[in-house]
Amino acid sequence: MRKKQIFLGIFFAFVATVCGGIMGTVFYLVRDLPQIRALESYTPSAITRVYSADNVLLAELYRDKRDPVPLDQIPAHLREALIATEDRQFHTHIGIDIKGIARALMRDIMAGEFVEGASTITQQLAKTLFLTSEKTITRKLKEAVLSLQLERRYTKDEILTLYLNQVYFGSGAYGVEAAARIFFAKSVRELNLSECALIAAMPKAPSVFSPLVNPHLAVTRRNIVLRQMLAVGAITHDQYDGAIASPYIAAKRQKTSEAPYFVDYIKKILEAEIGPDRLYRGGLTIKTTLSHQLQEFAEQALEKGITEIADRRRANHITGPDPQGAIIAMDVRTGGILAMAGGADHHRSVFNRAVDARRQPGSAFKPIVYAFAIEKGFHQGMRILDAPIAFPGPAKGDIWRPENFSKTYQGDITLRQALAFSLNIPAVRLIEKLGPAGVAAFARNLGIQSELTPYLSLALGTSEVTVMELTAAYAVFANAGTGIRPGAVVEVTDAAGQTVWKPAVEKWIAMSRQGAAIMTNMLEGVIQEGTGGRARHLPFPLAGKTGTTNGSRDAWFVGFSPSIAAGVWVGCDDATSLGPLETGSRAALPIWTDFMELAHKTLPYRHFDIPDDIVILTMDPKTGAPANKDAGGVRTFFRRENAPH
């Protein structure tokens, strides 16, 4: 009797110890678990979409490609397929499948390692939301406890909705809507039975069963899912036969984004303004200034131009890096960016040369010098000496002798013709009279934000600028002297249509209306009479300026119509030469001309605005004397107070 009492005492002590250990372990695990109530405020990460001004989808931004949908928009066949495949007892179990766990445990013991998980849909959801994927007993115990808590707090439909919007289907698709769009290019609500079964086949091994990776294996796995659906009575034999006979037709691969350089640009802006988490997870709608049609024209023109330059380089046996380029176009009235390409191929180089590359503009900077002179009372009929000149250099004994590109000189010449033919000496003489510091300050007022060195050589474009800021500076001439900071985003709204962020338009008076009109007239002369002649054939008003740096390292053309300002730069990233005679006129202007010709086929014809107090005379551009049109006279603008009499 005493032995029996001792045995029972030992037995109960053992049981108590085991139970206490289990309870202690459970208590420890529960204490360390995430709070299920956090799901009350849980919102699945959603895709942010970027649209052009003409409502074309440019890009989708996300951390996980996920597009949450309510349960009633998910086909019954897809729900049934996932339940038949992943968890047949879903509607009856308490979050864990006791029989399944016992069966898996036996297999683990037989194998001598952790091989089978016996996870229900609820357990898979708990793991996805709260835990890691490590294969340990501790993680499985935590998963089981969390699953029981989920089942107590939420209905089966709520758990299934969370699961369907959270589970990973491969190829970057999180949730059934993203999977439907990636694999079938349609919404989940449009899926047929065969497509539902194929999607349901993937969570088991997304990288293996993805139809984009292994289409034959994906179809084989789909057929297994269909057999399981038939076995549980979710579909009829006729439905099964029809779905089995359906081939998988791969969806057309979509571009990762339209206007990729532009999209990269606005991502930087919005990461700073609203934060990356909200940008990539908030399901926002971003309306931009970009014209999808003009963007296509810009990319087409840039690609053609760079290809032609590359062909000439090969013909001249020039080795080295491939030429690169950038183009940007903006609305002169609003400052809205209409088109942007920051390189020849975004896949090969994501560096945005339209906004991030600072390059010497060469003679494309000269209009800023002339505009400051016009503001200071000079007029385009004034004469200036084009002859060799020398200045003391920065070091003792140094002499700087600027030269014209052609190394020839015209003698006395009007400001208008000096700019039209891009003569260097008159520009240097002009900045000497005006003062380099004053020109640099005026350039900043036009919108140039890059650092400008206030030397005489600034007149020849030796300080580096970006394509965007120089184009914005030229837009001041077309916009009656008003400066506008280039903008890319119109508005950001959330899923409820509420405004999240709307940028303020930054405007200022950069120069006088009269000065802007006179500069526009002078830059029309560059195209009609000077180095911009390749654009002369276009049947609408245009103004602009070429730019070339020493050794043809950079070639530019920046200009505008009454509606659009556009800038083009081409060069090599390592600043080596483009090749002999690859000037702004030859290398950059054809790209600009092609773009402007295409763009203006979609725009109404407009004239440049002329202020009432501008005097228009017909002038000989060589001498500045009055001359009729038949004698070579050109239409020339003056301020009323300094017009020749």
Image (cartoon, rainbow, N blue to C red):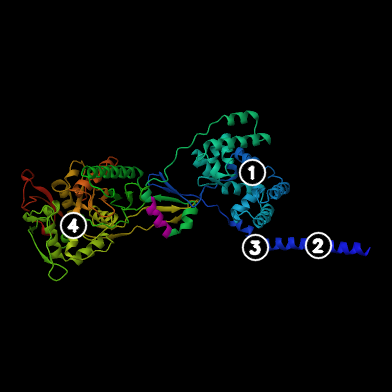
Q: Relative to the observer, which residue lies in front, 298 or 522?
A: 298
Instruction: Report the span colored magenta.
Output: 263-272
Residue at mark 4: 366
Residue type, numbered disc 2: Phe
Q: Residues within 10 Å of mark 3 (few under 14, many from 20)?
A: few
Whichever of labels 2 and 1 marks the residue nearer the N terminus, that label is 2
Is residue 372 placed above or below 177 in the rendered structure? below
Q: Separation of disc 1 and disc 4 at Cα?
A: 71 Å
Is the Cβ of the residue at disc 2 closer than 8 Å to that at disc 3? no
Residue at mark 3: 32
User: Mark 3, mark 4: which one is toward the viewer?
Assistant: 3
Q: Separation of disc 3 and disc 4 at Cα?
A: 69 Å
Residue at mark 2: 14
User: Mark 2, mark 3: which one is toward the viewer?
Assistant: 2
In the picture as drawn, the residue positioned furthest to the bottom comes out as 396
Q: Residue at 18%, 41% (x, y): give it.
A: 537
Query: In terms of secondary structure, what is the magenta stretch mainly?
Result: helix
Q: Residues within 10 Å of mark 1 (few under 14, many from 20)?
A: many
Is residue 645 something one can see in this rendering?
no
Whichever of labels 2 and 3 marks the residue nearer the N terminus, that label is 2
Residue type, numbered disc 3: Asp
Q: Residues within 10 Å of mark 2 (few under 14, many from 20)?
A: few
Residue at mark 1: 86
